[in-house]
Image (tube, rainbow, N blue to C red):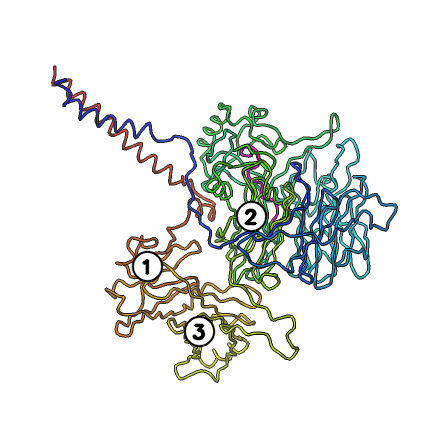
C-alpha cells in the first residue's frame, strides 16, 4: 500500500479522461431545442360526433359560417353534414361541450335519382354570396361526382357535374366560380378503370361545368415525376389533384399533385392549365433537416444522405408585401393500387432496395465521401432496414415520403422560400418525449419515425393583429403548429398546442384532418380561433388565441349610434400645410398608452417636392418616431404606424414594438436609404453610466438580437436617440445591468447570434455546419483523450523511476 499515494495521481488523471471519453454519447441523441411559445393558445370548446375509429374518417373537414355563427363539419361515419352553433361560445378556463344543432343527410337530399351516392368529402363556405358547396363522390369509383350547393339550413339549391372522385371543393372570393379537385384514383388497380384526374370549374351564374384536364404536355416541367415509368402523355391519368388554393386576385388556382410531388397552376377564367412544376426534394444531409429515421423506441436525430419528396397534401395561398406565396403541409403519400396482377406499389422497406442503390446524387450537407460513408453505415446496420422509401424515383439516392415539415414557396416560380426543417419532430420530442412519433391509432412510442414522422396534413393562413400566421395540423401525434410568416424568409415558430389524451390509444383530440381559421373580427368570443376536425377521435376542438378581446357593438344598438371607437386608433391626412420651418410635421399623441396611427399618403410626393427631407415626427410620450416621408412616396395607399408597448426583463427604459403596414396588408419594415429616428425617454435616476446605455433589437423569440449604439444622449432630461434601418421591437438597456446578454458578441452586431439550432442553415441552405451538441461532445472527447495520454505518460515515468 506504500505506492498508493504515487498511483493516486495517475489514477485520478486516467480515470477522469476515461470517463470523459466513454461517457460522451456517440449517437445523435436528442438535444432540447428550447423553443418557446410566443403566443398563447388554449382549447375552449369541443364537440364529439361519433365513436372513435382508428381508420379515421369520422370528423373531417370543418368550415365556419360567420353569418350565423355556426360551423359545418363532415361526419364521415354517419355520412352527414353536422351543424354546430357557436353563438353562446365564451372565452373560458374550462372546456365547453358543444351540441349538434342539426344533421343534413346529403344522400337523401340529392335530386338526381340516376346518381348513386358514394361519399361526402369536402365543404366550403362563402358568406359574401351566401354559398355552401360540398363535394360528393359516386359509389362507382369511375363515374363523375357532384358539386352540391346548399343554403345555410342545408337545403339543396343546385347540383353540378364534377369530375371523378371530387375530393376537395373551393369557392372563389368573388363567388363567381366553384372548383373541385377530382382525384380519380384507380382504386381497383391499373388493370381496371383508370379515370382521368381533373379540376372542375363551375361558373355559378351560367351553371356551366368544365373539367380541366392535364393533356397539354408542353406545360408540364421535365422534372415532374410520372409514376409507373410513365411519360408526360400519361399525366392525364397519373395526376390526381388533391387540394386547391386560390390567388388573391381570384384568377389562378394552385393545385397540389401529391403523389407527383408537384403543383399545377390553372387559369380559372380560361379553364386552362398554365404550368405543372416539381417541388424538388428535401436534403436531409443538411444541418437543420435532421430526422429520426429509426424505429427503435428512442429519440435520435441525425443528418443522413436522404432526399425527402415534399409531397404536400394541403396548400394555402397568401399575399405578403405584394408577393403571392403558397404554404404547404408536406405529408407524403405512397401509391398502393389494386391487387395481384393489377397492383402498383411504389413504396418498400429500405432493406429490400438498399443493394440496388448507388448513391451518386450530390448532397449539400455532405461531401461525396461523407455521403458514401453514411450510406454504407445505413446498409450495414439493421436499424435502418424498416425505413420506408420510394422505389420509383431512381437508384441514385435514398428517397423518402414527405418533408415532415411545412414549406413556403413563391407561387409564380415554386421557388422554396422557407422550410421548417426538423422543427416538428424536435418540438414534439421535447414536449412529449414519452409519446414521440406516436401514430394516431395506438400507443407505440417512435412508431412513425421510420415512416413519415408527424405527417403535417392541413394548413391554413390568417391574420392576428398585424402579423400573418400559418397553422399546420399534425395528423399522427396530433396538435396544431402555429408559425409567424409575416416575413416569409424569416418565419418564426409561435405555438404548439396538443389536446390529445395520451393516457389511452385514442383519447382526447386525435388526428387533425381539417383546420378552419376564424379571424378576430368574425369570432364569437372576440378572439381568433382555429377549429380542428380530428378524424380518428371523431371530435372537433376549438382553440382560442389569447389576445385582447375585440369589442363589438351591442346587437340592439340604435341605427344613429356610432360603434365604440378604439381610443388608441387615429387617422391623419398628411398635407404640406402641416410642415413647420424645419420641414417636420409634428403629431402629438403623448397621452396614448399605445398608438395605431393611420396616415394618408396621396400628397406625400407633393410634400417632398417642397422639402425632400420632410419628416413626420410622432410623439407618444416616452418615445418619439422620426419618419422620413421619402419612405412612403411610392406606397399610393394608406399606411398604419403601430407603436405597441412591450415588457422585457432588465430594461431601464421603454420597450416598444414598431410596425408600418400598408392598406393591402404588406409590411414596410426596411429603410436602408432613409433611416428612422427613435428617441426614447429614460429616467436619469436609473442610469449608472450613460456611456453604457444601448438600444437592443429584440427578435421574435424574445431574445436580444442586435445591439445599436445610440447617436446622442441627454443625460439631464433623460433621452436616448438612435437610428434604425428596420422596424421591430426595440428597448433601452444599460450594459452593466444587462450583463453578458445575447446580441453583444461583436461590435458591429450585423448578425443575429441567437438563432435556434439549425435556423440559419435552414434559411440559407448551405454549408456543413454540425449541431452545437456535436461540437461540444468533440471538445469533451478531445480533453478526455489528452487526460488519458497524460495519465499513460505519468505511468511510464513512474515505471522508469522504479527501474
Q: Counting residues from the N terminus, which is met first, the one under dot 2 or under dot 3?
A: 2
Mark linked to residue 191: none
Specify start and end residues of the magenta stretch as a single range. 446-458
Residue placed under numbered mark 3 in the picture? 592
- Label 3 crowding class (10 Å Cα cut-off): few <14, some 14-19, many 20+? some
Q: Residue furthest toward the right?
A: 114
Q: Secondary structure at mark 2?
A: strand
Residue 456 shown in magenta:
yes
Q: For residue 397, say whether it is visible.
A: no
Give the Cα separation between the discs numbered 3 and 1: 24 Å
Measured Cα–Cα span from mark 2 to mark 1: 33 Å
569 or 90, which lies in front?
Answer: 90
Quadrant where the C terminus lies?
top left
**CB atoms of marks 2 and 1 within 8 Å:** no
Q: CA distance from mark 2 to mark 3?
A: 36 Å
Q: Which residue is mark 1?
A: 650
Which mark is drawn over residue 480?
Answer: 2
Q: Secondary structure at mark 1?
A: loop
Q: In the picture, which quadrant includes the N terminus?
A: top left
Is 15 left or right of 43, judged from the image as shown?
left
Q: Nearer the viewer, residue 638 or 301?
A: 301
Amino acid at each position: 500500500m506504500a505506492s498508493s499515494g504515487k498511483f493516486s495521481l495517475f489514477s485520478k488523471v486516467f480515470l477522469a479522461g476515461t470517463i470523459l471519453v466513454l461517457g460522451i454519447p456517440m449517437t445523435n441523441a436528442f438535444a432540447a431545442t428550447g423553443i418557446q411559445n410566443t403566443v398563447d393558445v388554449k382549447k375552449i370548446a369541443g364537440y364529439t360526433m361519433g365513436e372513435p375509429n382508428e381508420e379515421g374518417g369520422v370528423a373531417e373537414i370543418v368550415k365556419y359560417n360567420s353569418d350565423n355563427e355556426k360551423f359545418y363539419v363532415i361526419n364521415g361515419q354517419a355520412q352527414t353534414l353536422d351543424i354546430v352553433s357557436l353563438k353562446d361560445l365564451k372565452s373560458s378556463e374550462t372546456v365547453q361541450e358543444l351540441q349538434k344543432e342539426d344533421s343534413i343527410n346529403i344522400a337523401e337530399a340529392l335530386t338526381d335519382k340516376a346518381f348513386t351516392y358514394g361519399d361526402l368529402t369536402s365543404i366550403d363556405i362563402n358568406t359574401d354570396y351566401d354559398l355552401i358547396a360540398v363535394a360528393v363522390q359516386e359509389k362507382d369509383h369511375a363515374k363523375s361526382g357532384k358539386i352540391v350547393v346548399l343554403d345555410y339550413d342545408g337545403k339543396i339549391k343546385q347540383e353540378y357535374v364534377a369530375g371523378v372522385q371530387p375530393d376537395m371543393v373551393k369557392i372563389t372570393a368573388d363567388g363567381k366560380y366553384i372548383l373541385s379537385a377530382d382525384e380519380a384514383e384507380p382504386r381497383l388497380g391499373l388493370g381496371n378503370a383508370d379515370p382521368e384526374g381533373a379540376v372542375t370549374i363551375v361558373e355559378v351564374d351560367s351553371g356551366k361545368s368544365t373539367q380541366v384536364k392535364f393533356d397539354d404536355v408542353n406545360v408540364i416541367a421535365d422534372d415532374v415525376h410520372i409514376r409507373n415509368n410513365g411519360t408526360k402523355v400519361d399525366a392525364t391519368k397519373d395526376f390526381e389533384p388533391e387540394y386547391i388554393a386560390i390567388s388573391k386576385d381570384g384568377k389562378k388556382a394552385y393545385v397540389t399533385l401529391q403523389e407527383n410531388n408537384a403543383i399545377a397552376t390553372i387559369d380559372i377564367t380560361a379553364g386552362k392549365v398554365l404550368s405543372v412544376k416539381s417541388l424538388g426534394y428535401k436534403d436531409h444531409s443538411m444541418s437543420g433537416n435532421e430526422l429520426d429515421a429509426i424505429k427503435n423506441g428512442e429519440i435520435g436525430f441525425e443528418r443522413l444522405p436522404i432526399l425527402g419528396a415534399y409531397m404536400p397534401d394541403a396548400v394555402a395561398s397568401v399575399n405578403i408585401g405584394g408577393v403571392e406565396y403558397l404554404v404547404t403541409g408536406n405529408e407524403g403519400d405512397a401509391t398502393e393500387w389494386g391487387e395481384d396482377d393489377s397492383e402498383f406499389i411504389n413504396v418498400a422497406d429500405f432493406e429490400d432496395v438498399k443493394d440496388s442503390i448507388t448513391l451518386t446524387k450530390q448532397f449539400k450537407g455532405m461531401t461525396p465521401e461523407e455521403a458514401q460513408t453514411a450510406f454504407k453505415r445505413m446498409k450495414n446496420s439493421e436499424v435502418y432496414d424498416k425505413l420506408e422509401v420510394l422505389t420509383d424515383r431512381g437508384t441514385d439516392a435514398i428517397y423518402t415520403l414527405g418533408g415532415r415539415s411545412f414549406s413556403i414557396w413563391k407561387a409564380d416560380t415554386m421557388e422554396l422560400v422557407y422550410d421548417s426543417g426538423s422543427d416538428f419532430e424536435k418540438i414534439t420530442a421535447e414536449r412529449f418525449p414519452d409519446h414521440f412519433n406516436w401514430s394516431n391509432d395506438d400507443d407505440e412510442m417512435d412508431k412513425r419515425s421510420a415512416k413519415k414522422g408527424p405527417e403535417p396534413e392541413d394548413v391554413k393562413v390568417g391574420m392576428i393583429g398585424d402579423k400573418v400566421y400559418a397553422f399546420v395540423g399534425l395528423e399522427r401525434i396530433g396538435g396544431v403548429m402555429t408559425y409567424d410568416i409575416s416575413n416569409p424568409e424569416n418565419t418564426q415558430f409561435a405555438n404548439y398546442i396538443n389536446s390529445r389524451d395520451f393516457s389511452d390509444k385514442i383519447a382526447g383530440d386525435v388526428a387533425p384532418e381539417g383546420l378552419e381559421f376564424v379571424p378576430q373580427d368574425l369570432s364569437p368570443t372576440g378572439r381568433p380561433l382555429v377549429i380542428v376536425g380530428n378524424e380518428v377521435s371523431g371530435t372537433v376542438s376549438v382553440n382560442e388565441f389569447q389576445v385582447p378581446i375585440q369589442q363589438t357593438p351591442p346587437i340592439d344598438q340604435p341605427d344613429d349610434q356610432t360603434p365604440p371607437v378604439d381610443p388608441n386608433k387615429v387617422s391623419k391626412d398628411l398635407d404640406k400645410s402641416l410642415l413647420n420651418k424645419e420641414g417636420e410635421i409634428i403629431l402629438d399623441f403623448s397621452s396614448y398608452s399605445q398608438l395605431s396611427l393611420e396616415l394618408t399618403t396621396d400628397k406625400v410626393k407633393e410634400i417632398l417636392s417642397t422639402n425632400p427631407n420632410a419628416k413626420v415626427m410622432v410623439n407618444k410620450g416616452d418615445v418619439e418616431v422620426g419618419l422620413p416621408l421619402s419612405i412612403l412616396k411610392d406606397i399610393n395607399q394608406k399606411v398604419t404606424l403601430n407603436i405597441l408597448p412591450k415588457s422585457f426583463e432588465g430594461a431601464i427604459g421603454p420597450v416598444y414594438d414598431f410596425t408600418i403596414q400598408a392598406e393591402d396588408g404588406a409590411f414596410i419594415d426596411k429603410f436602408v436609404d432613409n433611416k428612422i429616428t427613435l428617441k426614447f425617454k429614460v429616467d436619469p435616476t436609473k442610469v449608472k453610466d450613460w456611456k453604457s446605455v444601448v438600444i437592443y433589437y429584440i427578435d421574435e423569440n424574445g431574445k436580444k438580437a442586435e445591439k445599436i449604439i445610440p447617436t446622442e444622449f441627454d443625460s439631464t432630461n433623460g433621452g436616448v436617440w438612435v437610428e434604425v434601418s428596420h422596424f421591430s421591437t426595440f428597448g433601452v438597456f444599460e450594459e452593466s445591468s444587462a450583463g453578458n446578454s445575447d446580441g453583444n458578441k461583436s461590435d458591429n452586431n450585423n448578425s443575429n447570434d441567437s438563432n435556434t439550432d439549425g435556423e440559419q442553415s435552414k434559411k440559407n441552405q448551405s454549408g456543413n455546419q454540425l449541431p452545437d451538441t456535436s461540437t461540444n461532445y468533440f471538445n469533451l472527447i478531445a480533453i478526455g483523450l489528452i487526460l488519458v495520454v497524460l495519465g499513460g505518460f505519468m505511468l511510464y515515468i513512474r515505471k522508469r523511476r522504479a527501474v
